[in-house]
C-alpha cells in the first residue's frame, strides 16, 4: 500500500538524517492513536517524529497519552476543530460502559458533533438499527472547547506537515476545509469520508485534485499523495 511505503520511507530517512528535519504529523480526531489506526502508530517507528494529536473527548485523551507518553514530541490538543473558537456539543458514549465492555470497544472512536447514523439509531445503510436500544442509554452529550485549525497549528509552531489525518465522524470536511494546502502541502493526507454527506465528500476530492494530489479510495477513507 502506498501509505505504508510513504511512512516506511519517512522512517528510513529519519534514521539516516537524524533530527535535522523532524517528520511531523497532524491528526485531527486522534482517538487513542491505536485502535483501528494504521498510520498514527508509525510515530513510534519514525525516529524523532513529532505530532499534534487533536482529541476532544476526555476519556480518549487519557488513552492517547498512555499510548504516546513523550510530551515533548507528542502534543495533545484537547479540543474540537470548528470554524471559530468557542465550545461545542459532542455526542459520545459513557466512558465507564466502554471500559467495562458493556459497549463494543470500537464505539470509543464514534463520538461526533454531527448526527451520524450510529447516533441516530440507523445502520450504515440508513435503515433502523435493531441494536440501537441496547446502547442508546449510554449516549451522552458533553461540552468541549473548540478552536480553528490554524490556531492550533500556529500555537504549536507548525511550519511543515508531512502527514495530515482527519477522522471526525462526520465533521471531517469542517476540519479539512481549513487546511492551507498551498502553505503546508503534506506529503500524505488521509480523510475519513464514510460519514460525510455526498456534497462534502465531493468537496474533499475537489480540494485535493485542484491542489494536484493523487487521490485514491480505500474503505471509508480518501488517501492522497503530493
Image (tube, rainbow, N blue to C red):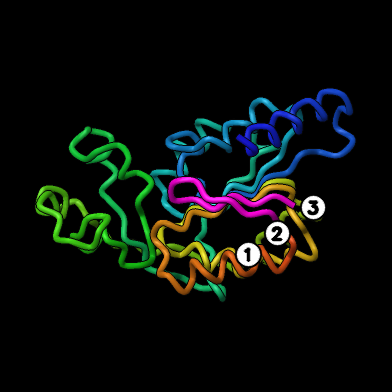
Residue 153 badge: 2
Q: Name which of mark 1 and mark 3 comes first in the sequence.
A: 1
Residues packed near mark 1 inside 10 Å, few (<14), some (14 to 19) or many (20 plus)? many
CA–CA distance between discs 1 and 3?
14 Å
Image position of 111 with respect to 22: above or below: below
Q: Position of residue 120 (x, y in %)?
A: 22, 64
As drawn, is 39 to the left or to the right of 181? left
Range shown magenta: 213-226
Which residue is at a point 39% across and 44% down the rendered structure image? 59
Secondary structure, mark 2, is helix
Quadrant hosting residue 73: top right
Residues packed near mark 2 inside 10 Å, few (<14), some (14 to 19) or many (20 plus)? some
Residue 160 badge: 3
Residue designated by label 1: 149
Picture quarter with the N terminus: top right
Chief SS of the magenta region: strand
Amino acid at each position: 500500500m502506498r501509505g505504508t511505503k510513504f511512512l516506511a520511507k519517512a522512517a528510513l530517512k529519519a534514521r539516516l538524517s537524524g533530527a535535522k528535519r523532524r517528520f511531523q504529523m497532524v491528526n485531527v480526531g486522534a482517538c487513542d492513536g491505536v485502535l483501528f489506526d494504521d498510520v498514527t502508530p508509525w510515530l513510534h517507528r519514525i525516529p524523532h517524529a513529532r505530532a499534534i494529536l487533536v482529541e476532544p473527548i476526555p476519556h480518549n485523551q487519557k488513552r492517547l497519552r498512555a499510548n504516546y507518553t513523550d510530551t515533548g514530541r507528542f502534543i495533545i490538543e484537547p479540543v474540537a476543530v470548528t470554524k471559530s473558537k468557542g465550545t461545542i456539543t459532542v455526542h459520545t458514549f459513557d466512558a465507564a460502559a466502554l471500559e467495562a465492555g458493556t459497549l463494543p470497544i470500537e464505539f470509543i472512536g464514534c463520538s461526533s458533533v454531527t448526527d451520524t447514523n450510529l447516533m441516530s439509531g440507523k445502520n450504515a445503510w440508513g435503515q433502523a438499527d435493531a441494536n440501537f436500544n441496547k446502547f442508546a442509554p449510554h449516549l451522552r452529550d458533553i461540552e468541549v472547547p473548540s478552536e480553528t485549525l490554524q490556531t492550533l497549528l500556529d500555537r504549536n509552531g507548525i511550519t511543515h506537515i508531512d502527514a495530515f489525518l482527519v477522522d471526525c465522524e462526520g465533521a471531517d470536511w469542517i476540519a479539512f476545509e481549513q487546511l492551507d494546502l498551498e502553505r503546508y502541502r503534506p506529503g500524505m493526507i488521509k480523510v475519513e469520508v464514510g460519514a460525510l454527506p455526498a456534497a462534502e465528500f465531493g468537496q474533499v476530492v475537489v480540494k485535493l485534485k485542484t491542489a494536484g494530489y493523487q487521490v485514491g479510495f480505500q474503505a471509508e477513507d480518501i488517501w492522497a499523495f503530493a
